């Protein structure tokens, strides 16, 4: 596979890790990155940290992709909108600015991507997530309402990237990770 960045986004329990494991099983990614944030940071420190991490990562990714490496991220900048608004209580303009600044680094003067980037956003209903996880005790997010809100923001995230949205518990995919993987690989190959 030609070098590219594959961003896998979605609410907790939507199937991100399962999809990434499937991609690894197929030998697709050369590298998998996962991002976490300082727990004690205030919202603006957290956002600044995140934006700095994304830009620094993109510099490294660009070098790896030039060598035909495939990189998969378990979440990246789009989560700043969904999780940032609901869990970290960012002002909307702040979350949008993080996405805009990050994507400005991805795009060259001709308004084209500097390298191939694919965003796969997984959705799932909170009731399905609760069945998969058993409960939300000690989880992030902590309520069913927060799950709904986060998933809603993922459907309207302001991005310039081409995105594939998959509802993993829909009738089409019927909680079948193999079908989700097949659709993701088909889309990545197109």
Image (cartoon, grey):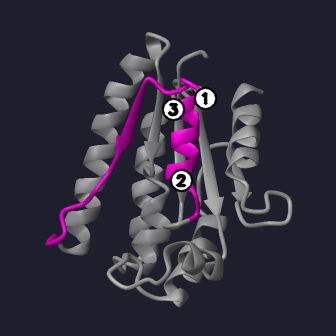
Q: Residue 35: within the magenta?
A: yes
Q: Is residue 62 left or right of residue 128?
A: left
**Marks 3 and 1, Cα distance to the nearest angstrom?**
28 Å
Does the rendering let one see residue 86?
yes
Q: Earlier in the sequence, mark 3 or mark 2?
A: 2
Instruction: Tell me: 121 left or right of 142.
Output: right
Q: Tell me if residue 83 is in the magenta stretch.
A: no
- Which residue lies at the image location 59% right of the left edge and 62% below the top edge? 157
The residue under the point 25% across, 73% down is 43
Q: Quadrant of the C terminus?
A: top right
Q: Is residue 101 left or right of residue 154?
A: left
Identify the residue shown where x is 41% and y is 23%.
62
Image location of residue 170, percent across then percent down: 79, 66
Residue 22 x %, y %: 58, 39
Tell me if label 3 and label 1 are in contact, CB under 8 Å. no
Looking at the picture, tell me which residue is in the foreground, 103 or 169: 169
- Quarter of the figure that contains the N terminus: top right
Local SS, label 3: helix
Q: Are marks 1 and 2 in contact (CB under 8 Å)?
A: no
Q: Is residue 157 above or below residue 162?
A: below
- Mark 2, Cα crowd under 10 Å, few <14 / some 14-19 / many 20+, is many
Which of disc 1 and disc 3 is earlier in sequence?
A: 3
* Residue highlighted by disc 1: 112
Residue plotted at (50% across, 69% down): 82
Marking on residue 16? 2
Please say whether residue 160 is visible from this viewpoint. Answer: no
Within 10 angstroms of label 3, few (less than 14), some, or many (20 or more) residues? Answer: some
Label 3 vs label 2, nearer the camera = 3
- Label at residue 24: 3
Q: Residue furthest right?
A: 172
Q: Is residue 143 above or below residue 82?
A: below
């Amino acid at each position: 596979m030609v070098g590219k960045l594959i961003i896998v986004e979605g609410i907790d329990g939507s199937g991100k890790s399962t999809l990434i494991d499937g991609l690894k099983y197929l030998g697709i990614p050369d590298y998998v990155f996962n991002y976490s944030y300082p727990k004690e940071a205030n919202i603006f420190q957290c956002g600044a940290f995140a934006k700095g991490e994304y830009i620094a990562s993109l510099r490294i990714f660009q070098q790896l992709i030039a060598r035909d490496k495939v990189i998969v991220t378990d979440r990246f900048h789009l989560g700043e909108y969904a999780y940032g608004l609901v869990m970290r209580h960012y002002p909307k303009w702040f979350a949008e600015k993080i996405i805009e600044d990050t994507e400005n680094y991805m795009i060259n003067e001709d308004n084209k991507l500097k390298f191939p980037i694919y965003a796969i956003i997984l959705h799932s209903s909170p009731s399905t997530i609760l069945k998969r996880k058993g409960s939300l005790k000690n989880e992030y997010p902590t309520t069913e309402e927060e799950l709904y809100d986060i998933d809603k923001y993922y459907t309207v995230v302001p991005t310039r990237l081409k995105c594939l949205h998959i509802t993993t518990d829909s009738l089409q995919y019927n909680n079948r990770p193999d079908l989700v993987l097949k659709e993701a690989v088909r889309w990545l190959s197109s």
